[in-house]
Amino acid sequence: MKKFREWPGNFKFAVVCGAAAVLAGVFLLCIGQSGMDYAMAGVAIAGGLVVVLGAPAWGLNDHEETARRKRARQARAELRRR
């Protein structure tokens, strides 16, 4: 697995947002007053954990990701030429 600083920017952003969601969920658990507060905290924690734990497996192969984006750019350029 690559180091965090070598990840593409969008994956870094996703992990940071996921970690923020986990922290916000824990904060909601601490100050929650009703059942819905706890439910929303659980949703925030679960969603954040999915992103934080899943992001390392999603797109760390830069070569495949770069090739996929290049093919998409070429396809868009081909469609514009028509």
Image (cartoon, rainbow, N blue to C red):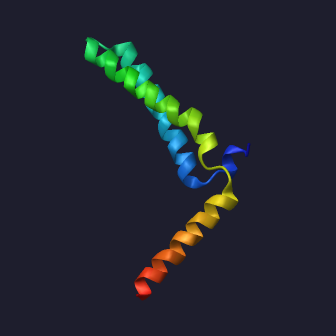
Name which quarter of the figure residue 47 lies in. Answer: top left
Above/below status of 81 relative to 4: below
Direction bottom: furthest residue? 81
Q: Residue placed at 47% from the left, 27% from the top?
A: 22
Q: Is residue 76 left or right of residue 53?
A: left
Above/below status of 66 relative to 9: below
Q: Is residue 4 left or right of residue 51?
A: right
Above/below status of 50 relative to 14: above
Which image quarter holds the N terminus? Answer: top right
Q: Is residue 2 left or right of residue 51?
A: right
Q: Position of residue 48 (x, y in %)?
A: 47, 32
Name which quarter of the figure residue 3 lies in. Answer: top right
Q: Position of residue 45 (x, y in %)?
A: 45, 25
Question: Total label count?
Answer: 0
Q: Residue placed at 69% from the left, 52% from the top?
A: 6
- In the image, 18 versus 47, the foreground residue is 47
- In the image, 75 versus 29, the foreground residue is 75
Q: Residue placed at 39% from the left, 20% from the top?
A: 42
Above/below status of 75 relative to 67: below
- In the image, 7 versus 64, the foreground residue is 64
Which image quarter holds the C terminus? Answer: bottom left
Q: Position of residue 57 (x, y in %)?
A: 63, 41
Q: Residue placed at 38% from the left, 25% from the top?
A: 43
Direction front: furthest residue? 82
- In the image, 52 versus 27, the foreground residue is 52
